[in-house]
Amino acid sequence: MRMVDIIEKKKAGGKLSKEEISFFVKGLVDGSIPDYQASSFLMSVVFRSMDDEETSYLTEAMMNSGDVIDLSSIPGIKLDKHSTGGVGDKTSLSLMPLVASFGLKVAKMSGRGLGHTGGTLDKMESIPGTNVYLSEDDFKRQVRDIGIAIVGQTAEIDPADKKLYALRDVTGTVESIPLIASSIMSKKLASGSDAILLDVKYGRGAFMKDVPSARHLAKTMIAIGRRLGRAVRAIVSGMEEPLGRAVGNSLEVIEAVETLKGRGPSDFVELVETAGGILLTQGKVAHDEEEGKLLIRKAIADGSGFKKLEQLIASEGGDISYLENTDKFQKAKFAYEIKATEDGFVHGIDSLSIGHAAMLLGAGRSRAEDRIDFAAGIYLMKKAGDQVAKGDVLAVAYSDKSDVQPALEEIGGAYCVEKEKPSLPPLIREYIRQ
Ligand code: URA
């Protein structure tokens, strides 16, 4: 088999066989296929796409390029959830402890933030002492013993994705549904769970800019799950404005804790309840999503979700006194208020700009090796739909830096304020089971 023939075939719009796709992934990982051929192949996929069968072959070959975690020795249904990323998305920190509080097993490998999006691992590490790097044995032991582990992905998981993602990033080949779907699903499948809920975001701050493309991605990933024997469901939810009010690592942990104590912002609570209702159905704790939602509300009200978060953090070495008293989190040196310049209603808050401004304030990374300031970030005092008067505080920016004018201007510019009351779409646009 020759890589050039595989590239030619895809370039002409042909359908690739399992053997051809495996040949590409093996050669990519062992170095026998050079980056220029891999890049050319990726570009041919961007233009010619792949059908569900080819995408599943690609996903399977990527998954098998490294370690595949076997959780079958742990009794019960193992659940995972994945968000395609956004701004202010601290869902895993509230949702997964709630789900685990019902005795379901949560085995989750998460990522770090890059660019305008945040990552669960960075948020967890803002709690002093937390170590998210567990060996595979310790990961499994923790899932068995306390029912939940959220850890960093080991270097041995899915090396094909690491190589492909780095190439895609610099060759203009990120935006392709089969490439995104196989990248996400190969990692999810390698981490071993039986059932997965995907939260596919759409909007300015997301990979998918509109509902139809988010739906297409969701359906592609569900089809991969079906072909590879995992139960996958998805929701399509809005990232037109940041989720909740807090953006930035320790600010988001505080919001996740507040949510588990029954004091979360309404959009975030809605997402946690809806996703939780689905996960409890997937885990067969609830008969249907509505019952699941009620159970999640109960686990918030009786504190069992919060207790499970404490167990999770304690088990990974974190100091849970910070969760009990969130005033202990170190504060940023400076707090800057961003004020409304006119009367009206907030029609939207551009997530991309807020994520970018948070990065400038020190909350995120522009390069993988950048250091994060855990206390930096933005608190949104006003959200879409709120009425504002000229001079009202729209948002507060926190940073140790004193030269943050560009970030403050970006936050002000992210707010769209108009005279008339807006009619806003629901946060959760679709629930897709198959
Ligand atoms: N997230 C991933 O893991 N991969 C992609 O290609 C896009 C988003």
Image: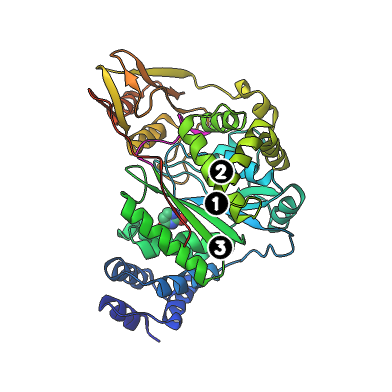
- Magenta highlight range: 239-249
Residue 256 location in percent, x, y?
Answer: 56, 33
Do labels 2 and 1 touch, CB within 8 Å?
A: yes
Circle 3 residues within 10 Å: few <14, some 14–19, many ≥20:
many
Identify whether 288 is placed above or below 14: above
Q: Residue furthest right?
A: 145
Give the quarter the ligand 1 occupies. bottom left
Q: Is residue 235 left or right of residue 338?
A: right
Nearer to us of marks 1 and 3 is 3
Answer yes or no: do the residues labelled 2 and 3 have beta carbons within 8 Å? Answer: no
Q: Is residue 274 magenta?
A: no
Q: Is residue 180 above or below residue 421?
A: below
Q: Which mark is residue 92?
A: 2
Q: Is residue 244 magenta?
A: yes
Residue at figure coordinates x 32%, y 55% from the top left: 212
Examine the rendered structure and indicate whether residue 259 appears above or below residue 232.
above
User: Foreground mark, 2 or 3?
Assistant: 3
Q: 411 or 268, which lies in front?
A: 268
Residue at 71%, 56% (x, y): give it. Answer: 140
- Residue at 54% in and 59% down: 188
User: Picture coordinates of residue 318 (x, y %)?
Assistant: 68, 36
